Image (cartoon, rainbow, N blue to C red):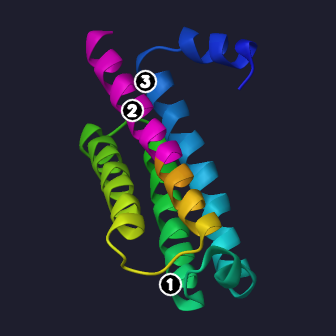
């Protein structure tokens, strides 16, 4: 992110910041889901994760992205829905790290790095969303 983009993001407050945080999550999650769904047969060897698992994950991510986008674009934000997104993002982080450390599958080195990197990005979404919700209650 450029410093100009960071400046614009930091200028947002309350409802606007929450909506941007949710939409950013939805776009990145949707792109990731589409890549998993469409490219599972190409990614399975590179990531060391089963094709069926990647397809199921891709389908879940597309549905989740649509739900997050829907939440972000309602005339009035539903705080419970936003909290659910934050909670599900936190659960994704925990599950991603468990996948790598508990041997649920046998990802390649690149696959393990990708899963951890993705967990870091999702943790960032959850943190930004939680921050935005806290700011919303102070506006």
Q: Is residue 79 visible?
A: yes
Provide the residue designation for mark 2.
Answer: 127
Which circle marks residue 53 in the picture? 1
Provide the residue designation for mark 3.
Answer: 15
Q: Report crowding for label 3: few under 14, some 14 to 19, many 20 or more residues within 10 A (C-alpha).
A: some
Q: Which residues are magenta?
A: 120-139
Residue at the location (63% across, 74% down)?
47
**Where on the picture, by quarter, is residue 55?**
bottom right
Name the secondary structure under disc 3: helix
The quadrant of the image that shows the N terminus is: top right
Residue at the location (53% across, 14% down)?
12
Between the residue at mark 1 and the residue at mark 3, the CA separation in whole angstroms equals 36 Å
Q: Report crowding for label 1: few under 14, some 14 to 19, many 20 or more residues within 10 A (C-alpha).
A: some
Which circle marks residue 121 in the picture? none
Residue at the location (47% across, 51% down)?
119
State which tag comes first along the sequence, 2 or 1: 1
Mark toward the viewer: 3 or 2: 2
């Amino acid at each position: 992110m450029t410093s100009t983009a960071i400046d614009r993001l930091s200028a947002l407050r309350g409802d606007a910041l929450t909506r941007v945080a949710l939409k950013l999550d939805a776009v990145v999650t949707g792109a990731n889901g589409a890549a998993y769904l469409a490219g599972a047969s190409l990614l399975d060897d590179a990531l060391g994760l089963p094709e069926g698992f990647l397809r199921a994950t891709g389908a879940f991510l597309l549905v989740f992205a649509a739900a997050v986008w829907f939440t972000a674009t309602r005339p009035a934000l539903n705080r419970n829905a936003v909290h659910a997104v934050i909670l599900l993002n936190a659960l994704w982080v925990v599950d991603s790290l468990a996948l790598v450390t508990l041997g649920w599958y046998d990802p390649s080195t690149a696959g393990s790095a990708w899963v951890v990197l993705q967990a870091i990005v999702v943790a960032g979404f959850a943190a930004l969303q939680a921050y935005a919700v806290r700011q919303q209650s102070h506006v």
